[in-house]
Amino acid sequence: MDTILGDFYRTEQITRTTDTSYRAAIRLNADHAIFRGHFPGNPVTPGVCMMQIIKDLCEAILNKPLFLLRSSNVKFMALINPLEHPLLTLDLELVYEDETHIKVKNVSCFEDTVALKLTNVYKIEHE
């Protein structure tokens, strides 16, 4: 599936770790135009981009389009500088609430640092 972020990041690997859990490795593109404005000379990955990456990864795992209904427990815990930490690991737990809704719990890290924790509920869109 294509992403609205274009070449902002590249998925290097997605591995299923349990029946409902996955680990994804992504590499941020520090040369992307978003980082020139956020922030010049000190690039920081925008939180909204991280939320889109999580949605993109879930769509790739499920091979279905998703619509974000709600987010809860969103905790940005560390700044992600793509020059210093281009490789991120995202742990995703996907649990169906019913046939058309899925809850996703995420922990995003670089090295041993937790950068983001959140829980999202998505509606599975009809293709």
Image (cartoon, rainbow, N blue to C red):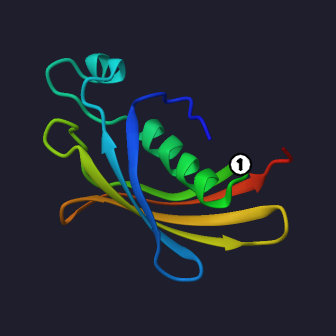
124 left or right of 29 in image: right
How many numbered discs, if any? Answer: 1
Measuring 22% from the left and 29% from the top, which residue is drawn there?
A: 43
Per the image, the residue denoted by label 1 is: 66
36 left or right of 103 in image: left
83 left or right of 25 in image: left
Query: Considering depth in this image, is 101 or 28 the residue closer to the camera?
Result: 28
Within 10 Å of the Cα at label 1, are there few (<14), some (14-19), or many (20+) other Cα atoms?
many
Inspect this view and state whether residue 52 appears.
yes
Query: Considering depth in this image, is 76 or 43 the residue closer to the camera?
Result: 43
Measuring 71% from the left and 48% from the top, which residue is drawn there?
A: 66
User: What element does badge 1 sit on?
Assistant: strand
79 left or right of 124 in image: left
Q: Quadrant of the C terminus?
A: top right
Image: 59 above or below 28: below
Residue 90, position in %: x, y? 39, 60
Quarter of the view holding residue 50:
top left
Quarter of the view holding residue 84:
top left
Residue 20, position in %: x, y? 59, 77
Residue 44, position in %: x, y? 26, 34
Residue 88, position in %: x, y? 30, 53
Q: Quadrant of the N terminus?
A: top right
